[in-house]
Image (cartoon, helix red, strand yellow):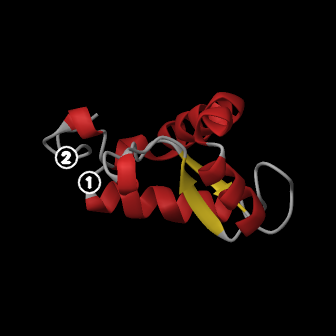
Amino acid sequence: MSKTFWNKTPKKKRLSKSAMRAYILWMNDKHPLCQICGDTADDLHHLFYGRYGADKDDKTLISVCRKCHEFCHQHKKESQEKYEHIVKNNWEKFKGETIERY
C-alpha cells in the first residue's frame, strides 16, 4: 500500500480524496441494491462513525435504501453488529480489485 492511500491521521481511518472517490464509484457500481433488504440503494452509509458524523471509518461503507439507512441511524449498535461482516467484505473486495492503483 502506498503512503498516499491513507491521510496522515490513520487513527481517524480516513481515505485520501482520490481513494474515497474510487471506493464510492466502486460501491455504486458493484452494489446498486440495498445490501440489507435488496431494494434499490439510495445512499452509502458509514457503518462506523462518531458523534455527528465525526471520526468516520471510510472503509465501512454499505449500500442502503432510505428505509434501511434510517434503521442504521436509529439502531446504531445493532446495525454495526449485524452488518459489520458486509462492510468488511466490501472493503476486502475493493482492496483486492483496486489497491494497486494507489
Which residue is depicted at the point 31% across and 61% down? 18
Q: Confirm or deny contact between disc 1 and disc 2 (CB under 8 A).
A: yes
The residue beneath circle 1 is 16
Three-letter residue code for mark 1: Ser
Q: Is residue 53 above or below residue 81?
A: below
Q: Is residue 65 above or below residue 14?
A: below
Left or right placement of residue 92 versus residue 17 in this view: right
Residue 20 is situated, as x and y percent measured from the top left of the image, at: 38, 57
Q: Identify which residue, 57 or 76, lies in the foreground.
A: 76
Mark 1 vs 2, N-terminal side: 2
Three-letter residue code for mark 2: Asn
Residue 100 is situated, as x and y percent measured from the top left of the image, at: 37, 42
Q: Identify which residue, 91 or 73, lies in the foreground.
A: 73
Q: Tally the marks.
A: 2
Instruction: Identify the element where label 2 is drawn.
Output: loop
Which residue is depicted at the point 23% across and 32% down? 11
In the rendered image, which quarter contains the N terminus? top left
Left or right placement of residue 10 versus residue 42 in this view: left
Which residue is depicted at the point 28% across and 61% down? 17
Residue with the most extreme right position: 38
Whole-number angstrom distance, CA of label 1 to CA of label 2: 5 Å
Which residue is depicted at the point 19% across and 46% down? 7
- Disc number at residue 46? none
Task: Tell me if mark 1 has few (under 14), some (14-19) or many (20+) residues whose alpha carbon lies within 10 angstroms of its own.
Answer: some
Task: Tell me if mark 2 has few (under 14), some (14-19) or many (20+) residues whose alpha carbon lies within 10 angstroms of its own.
Answer: some
Residue 24 is situated, as x and y percent measured from the top left of the image, at: 50, 61
Quadrant position of residue 32: bottom right
Q: Identify which residue, 96 or 44, lies in the foreground.
A: 44
The residue beneath circle 2 is 7
Residue 70 is situated, as x and y percent measured from the top left of the image, at: 67, 60
Instruction: Identify the element where label 1 is drawn.
Output: loop
